Amino acid sequence: MERGVSSMPGKQRRRRCVVLVVVAVLLLIVIIAVAIGVSLQQTPEQEQFKDTFITRCERFKEANCPEIWKVFQQAYVNQDHCKVPAEAYDALVAAAPFTPPCNRMMFWSKTKDVVHDFTEKKDCFVTLEDTLLGEVLDGLTWCGKEGSDETFTSGCPGWSECVDNPVRSFWNRISAAYADVACGEVTAMLNGSIPTPFHPDSIFGSVELKRFNATRVKTLNVVLVTQDNKVTNCTNASLKDLQMELDKGIKYNCKEAPQSQINACSSDPAAPCGSCW
Ligand SMILES: *[C@@H]1O[C@H](CO)[C@@H](O)[C@H](O)[C@H]1NC(C)=O
Ligand SMILES: *[C@@H]1O[C@H](CO)[C@@H](O)[C@H](O)[C@H]1NC(C)=O
Ligand SMILES: *[C@@H]1O[C@H](CO)[C@@H](O)[C@H](O)[C@H]1NC(C)=O
Ligand SMILES: *[C@@H]1O[C@H](CO)[C@@H](O)[C@H](O)[C@H]1NC(C)=O
């Protein structure tokens, strides 16, 4: 017989028992609460990424965003993050097809900030990043992992780490889809502050330009954006290479335009579209 317990009067023993039960129940509640908290927090990156996706998508009124999210994920979840080819996004392009704004389509290479500042302020031209898929995923990083249904935003391969990575394949695929539907007069903003404004390895050179089809595209207008110290001009040999890549039958124009002039024009509400260069 244990002395301590046996010597306790019955009432006191019962009270101690109640206290023990209460403590045990409280402990259980704390454990459950912590477990729920942990499970809710388990995938904050996934939740945040999805929130951003859906919020941006809902700016496009006609879009079925939950469906587009579902189809998007299917391209890369549960895949090795270096084995996602561009074709993995075929179903996504089909789920959110591009309706081409003929004569207003704007392509660009090495002029990202200027071109987007321009299309934001002036509703004249539409870049890929102004379309649903482009806008929703602009600036984001994502990948999957074999054996998991989750979306990761860290630990994903860099742009050049492997060719078939989820982000690079996405941009290649939707750039191709946007260029496929290009029509009428097409504009491309290139950088005149670098020695070689046209790079055959850029997305514009390797994907978009090759897709322009003379049955739909009438003219390609290159706008070469220059700064005070002009580095190159429309006579540059790389722009000859560009013309050779162009589908026969598409007319070509090139015009130099100072960046200051483009900025001034985009800030002037009275300036008509197309008068900025
Ligand atoms: C052209 O490239 C240079 C060097 O990378 C950069 O500083 C400049 O802002 C670019 N110009 C435009 C119009 O984006
Ligand atoms: C352009 O479209 C026509 C008809 O759809 C097709 O036969 C041709 O191969 C296309 N050309 C290019 C350069 O994609
Ligand atoms: C274009 O640049 C070349 C040198 O790169 C120069 O010889 C030529 O005069 C320039 N042409 C124009 C129209 O500015
Ligand atoms: C023009 O293009 C060629 C090749 O495409 C390049 O090597 C050259 O440096 C370019 N720029 C100037 C300013 O000449």
Image (cartoon, rainbow, N blue to C red):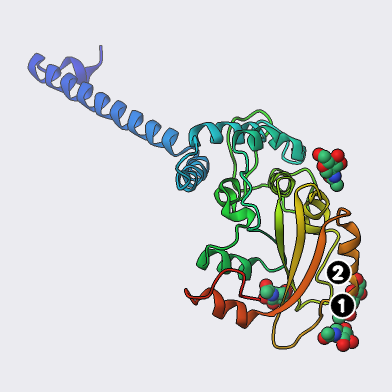
Q: Which quadrant does ligand 1 occupy?
A: bottom right
Q: Quadrant of residue 13?
A: top left
Q: Is there CB contact under 8 Å for labels 2 and 1?
A: yes
Give the vertical position of 40 relative to 117 (above or below).
Answer: above
Label 2 sits on residue: 239
Q: Which residue, as the protein is rendered here, is positioned at the far bottom?
A: 229
Q: Which mark is residue 235?
A: 1
Residue displayed at 61% across by 36% down: 72
Front-lying residue, 60 or 157: 60
- Where is residue 172 shown, x and y percent of the image? 74, 48
Give the vertical position of 83 relative to 26 (above or below).
Answer: below
Q: Is ligand 3 within 8 Å of the beta carbon of the residue shown at mark 1?
A: yes
Q: Is ligand 4 within 8 Å of the beta carbon of the residue shown at mark 2?
A: yes
Front-lying residue, 187 or 272: 272
Q: Amino acid at mark 1?
A: Thr
Give the Cα distance between marks 2 and 1: 7 Å
Near mark 2 (Cα within 10 A), the count class, few <14, some 14-19 or many ≥20, is: some
Q: Which mark is residue 90?
A: none
Q: Quadrant of residue 76?
A: top right
**Quarter holding the C terminus?**
bottom right
- Where is residue 37 shown, x and y percent of the image? 38, 36
Q: Is residue 54 left or right of residue 117?
A: left
Dot 2: what SS?
A: helix
Q: Quadrant of residue 246?
A: bottom right
- Where is residue 101 shown, x and y percent of the image? 61, 51
Q: Amino acid at mark 2?
A: Leu
Near mark 1 (Cα within 10 A), the count class, few <14, some 14-19 or many ≥20, is: few
Dot 1: what SS?
A: loop
Front-lying residue, 238 or 244: 244
Q: Which residue, as the protein is rendered here, is positioned at the far top?
A: 1
**Quarter holding the N terminus?**
top left
